[in-house]
Structure formats: C-alpha cells, structure tokens
Amino acid sequence: MIATIVHTDELLQTIAASVIAGIGVTFAFSVGIWGAGQFIELSRNERPVAATAALAMGGLALACVAASIVIGIIVMTSK
C-alpha cells in the first residue's frame, strides 16, 4: 500500500468551494453597490417607494456578504 501524498478529492472540494464562494460573494457585493446607486438615483427622481426597495435589496445583499465573512471565519477557526 502506497500512501497518498495529495488527497485529490479534498483538494477538488476546496477548489470548488472557493470558486463558488468567490463568485457568490462578489455577486452579492455588486448587488449591494447597485442597490446603493439605485437608491441615490431614485431618491433624486423623487420615487421614494422604489428607492426604499433598492435600499432594502442593497442592504440585504451587504448583509449576505457580512454573513459569509462571519461563516468563513467560523469555519477557519473550527478546524
């Protein structure tokens, strides 16, 4: 029996998780920026309901980014 030096399955899982998390967090952050920009634009055009909806969407997206950071820290410190 030859010992394996590189655990390929675990390495591929790590790569897949990092790619998926990187794309997801980047997308969520971009939605947060978009929401802030739309809030400003809609506020200037005196559309308060749409501005509030854009602000809520941006805030929710930024909350998702913050949650992913917290989850990442918890996962890194628990292993």
Image: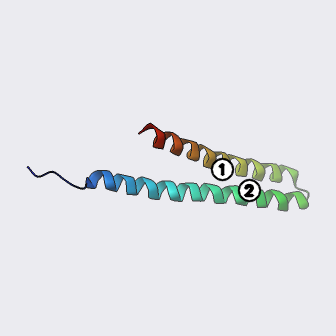
Residue at left offset 25%, top offset 56%: 6
Q: Are marks 1 and 2 in contact (CB under 8 Å)?
A: yes
Please provide percent x and percent y for residue 22: 51, 58
Which residue, given by chain and number where applicable, does mark 1 sit on? 61
Quadrant containing the C terminus in the rendered view: top left
Q: Nearer the viewer, residue 34 or 73?
A: 73
**For the residues marked 1 and 2, what is the alpha-carbon distance in whole angstroms?**
9 Å
Q: Nearer the viewer, residue 53 or 40?
A: 40
Residue at left offset 40%, top offset 56%: 16
Could you say whether the residue bearing mark 1 is in a helix, strand or loop?
Answer: helix
Figure label count? 2
Indicate which disc, 1 or 2, sits on the residue closer to the N terminus.
Answer: 2
Please provide percent x and percent y for residue 57: 71, 50
- In the picture, measured across the screen, residue 56 lies left or right of residue 63, that is right
Could you say whether the residue bearing mark 2 is in a helix, strand or loop?
Answer: helix
Which residue, given by chain and number where applicable, does mark 2 sit on? 35
Residue type indicated by callout 1: Ala
Residue at left offset 66%, top offset 45%: 63
Query: Visible in this render: residue 45?
Result: no
